[in-house]
Image (cartoon, rainbow, N blue to C red):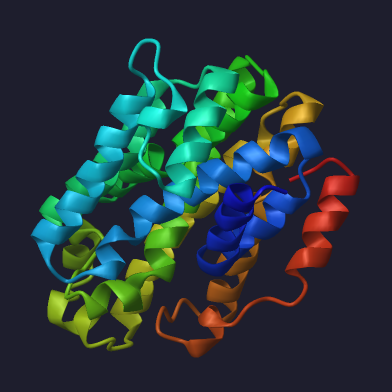
Amino acid sequence: MCLSIEYCANIVKQYDYENFMATLLMTKSVRSPALVLRAFNVEIARVQDQTSDAQTAAFRLQFWHDTVKTIYQKEQNILNVPANPIAQELFKVCVCYGLQKRQLEKLILSRSNLLNSKHFKTLEDIEKYAEDSVSPIYYLLLDILGVANVNADHAASHLGKAQGITNILRSVRISNYHKMVTLPMDILMKYSVSQEDVLRCIDSENMRNVAYEVASRANSHLQKARSIEVPTISKQIFLPAIAIDQFLSKLQKVHFNLFDNALHVNTPTLPFRLYYNRVIKKF
């Protein structure tokens, strides 16, 4: 493994462990480009966590926007790509597999939009954010696999939504640190939960009702993704469904208390379940 690929792998392992474990189980030809895409997504997802200054965060996202623009210029070569290991490897992957520029741009734009709005008005807005911030990774992985299949695309869309909505639930505490309430305003209002209650991590029956409704939408998309018949070769990229399922099950066990510490403890059975489902070709 070259140093830049190793760098990408370490970034994903450190900040996106569940997807890292799932990626390790992919076939060798897909594994390295998948780690590059995951590392790219980690970098843009972490922008907001790395600084409390909105302008600095915007500049960092602009760097990646400019990098993607540079990668897709005609007759481009790696010498003109920023001397960043992720950027350099992303260039190689995009050139090798002819990846769609618009999918990479969606990933960046979704983060930029959240940086500007800092909240979601409706649960449907979260679905749209999930579709734009997670699903493109699956579309790009399908391209790398050479799978052009409508069912696989539909599964990718639903799994991306399930994972994106689940990420919102998981990150409530982190978002609170940044004084952001990312739970949908319409559901909070429906159950008379104030933004202050969320920021102060106040557990209540109404707060649990909010969590239940949002989690139910995530589970609905997860089950829909699993119900779709997809080409066998593509099932390996959908393995993150296992981690989503485990988190939603844990949330149910703590009666939808988003602030329960048990939700933030790694599940020791995850590696085994990932491997088992890889062997039986399920997700």
Q: Nearer the viewer, residue 98 or 241?
A: 98
In this rendering, the answer to whether 58 lies above or below 68 is below
Visible residue check, residue 119:
no
In x, y percent, where is residue 204? 32, 86
* Residue depicted at 47% across the width and 38% down the height: 88
Q: Nearer the viewer, residue 113 or 169?
A: 113
In x, y percent, where is residue 278? 83, 47
* Residue depicted at 43% across the width and 69% down the height: 170
In this rendering, the answer to whether 18 lies above or below 136 is below
Q: Nearer the viewer, residue 132 or 67?
A: 67
Q: Residue furthest top?
A: 74
In this rendering, the answer to whether 37 lies above or below 53 is above
The part of the image, by quadrant, that contains residue 207 is bottom left
Visible residue check, residue 241:
yes
The part of the image, by quadrant, that contains residue 282 is top right
Q: Residue furthest right?
A: 279
In this rendering, the answer to whether 254 lies above or below 214 is below
Q: How many marks?
A: 0
Q: Nearer the viewer, residue 229 or 7?
A: 7
In x, y percent, where is residue 223? 61, 45
* Residue depicted at 30% across the width and 42% down the height: 64
Say left or right for 176 vs 28: left
* Residue depicted at 57% across the width and 56% down the height: 7
In x, y percent, where is residue 42? 44, 55
Say left or right for 53 vs 39: left
Say left or right for 188 vs 28: left
